[in-house]
Amino acid sequence: MLRALALAMLVLVAPPVLAADLGGDTRRDSPILPGEKQFDSLSRDEVQAILDRLNVKPPADATTKTRLKKVIKSIELIRVEARNGNNPFNAEDPIDNATVNGIVVQQAVDDLNDDGNGNNNGAGLDACIGQTVTGVQPAGAPDIVREVSLVIDPVTLDCTILTGNSVDGAFLIMDFFDGQSQVQVGQDVLQVFPDATLPVWTLVDPNVIPFEIDPFDAARVQQFTLAANGGVLVRATLLFTPVGGTDFQVTIINLEQL
Amino acid sequence: MRVALTALLLLTVATAASAQESRRFRAIASPEAVPEGQEPVAQVDPVSREAANNAVKEVLQAWNDGRLGDYLGEDFVDRGRLLDSVTEDVPRDASVRVLGLSAVQTVQQFRSTGEGGARLVTSIVSANADTQVEFNDPVRGFRTLRGQNTFFLRITEEVVE
């Protein structure tokens, strides 16, 4: 019984083995070499196995899968993508350039907080005076909206100007709506208002919230006076400039504590 | 009887094993611009991070030494303008250095045959670099201009035995 069962097992197992032997390459001393295209698809070990069978001895310091060495012949810089800050390969000026939020400006990184008077203080209201910023689409907003946020600390009066979304407690938020859109059909509109998310500042002059320039079809200088919760008064003189019907710029002409 | 059971068990295991499949991961082929006289490799052999780091440093050293023209590809946009700007606008004592390098990738690789039948491998390598330009300003003193930039380098290697 057992012998019969063992025989049956042999019959079951043997055919695949025999088939494998018959289908394989029996010329042990002459391995089939891979073609040019096949070569690249082989693993390091497979290539080495073929080389071993061919009795090829690679140099001792070889590093690649074929035990060959690669020596650098030339290096060329073909492109530079500026991410942030200075790009020493800016063709217009390798020194006076900076990328801020993806926008390249022809101004040195350390000049961004300079008011142009040589006092590169980077703090206080002076930090923003003289700066021009182009509005960008805030995260999550429709593509017809461009925003600039002016942030002033009510205690230290340190100033920062941001493109796009503000942080809570911003001094002023400036939203531009492209008039070609279906939301504000007909004409461009600019709205200026203090941040209401965390009401640190209140617009006292003009006493209209939001202050609106409608239509916003020409450059215009506007003055705003804001009061902080602690009683500090700051007057901002800003220049708003429409750009190409779809964007706008803000230039901080002056900021002063009253 | 016990032998028979063992044999049957072995047969079952063997059948299950033969049904398994062992496949390697392969990148999905996509069309790419192939430079004239070159052909893409089937499997990219990445340029090492160390080699890429040295390559970036070499290019920046050329910026410092006024030899940038030797390292700027002919297809670099505004090549001539950049060389003029570096010569005219950059202070003589200005130098740029790498503060850090990250995300080194070999994005494309081609092979070709060079002079005398040399086997060449050309790699397009991208690397994010933190750079800093330093110089003394006669009015404002020592200045440092930091930046983050992605460099795309074409590195050509010769395969030698």
Image (spheres, rainbow, N blue to C red):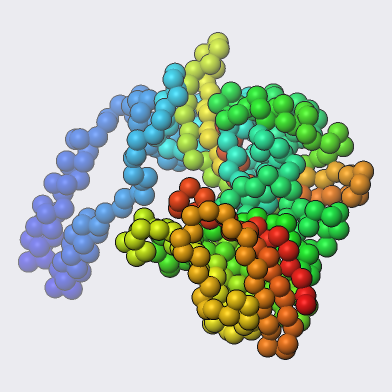
| x, y percent for residue A176 | 48, 62
Viewer-nearest residue: A189 or A11: A189
| x, y percent for residue B14 | 22, 59
| x, y percent for residue B89 | 78, 34
The answer to whether residue B155 is seen in the rendering is no
Residue drawn at x 63%, y 81% as measured from the top left: A204
| Up/down of B21 relative to A22, above or below | below
Q: In the orientation shown, which residue stands out farthest toward the top? A: B116
Viewer-nearest residue: B133 or A120: A120
Where is the C terminus of chain A found, in terms of image quarters?
Answer: bottom right
Residue drawn at x 34%, y 65% as measured from the top left: A183
Residue drawn at x 31%, y 50% as measured from the top left: B23
Viewer-nearest residue: B63 or B23: B63
| Up/down of B90 relative to B100, above or below | above
Q: How many marks?
A: 0
| x, y percent for residue A84 | 64, 52
Residue drawn at x 73%, y 43% as measured from the top left: A96
**Left or right placement of residue A142 versus residue B156 in this view:** left
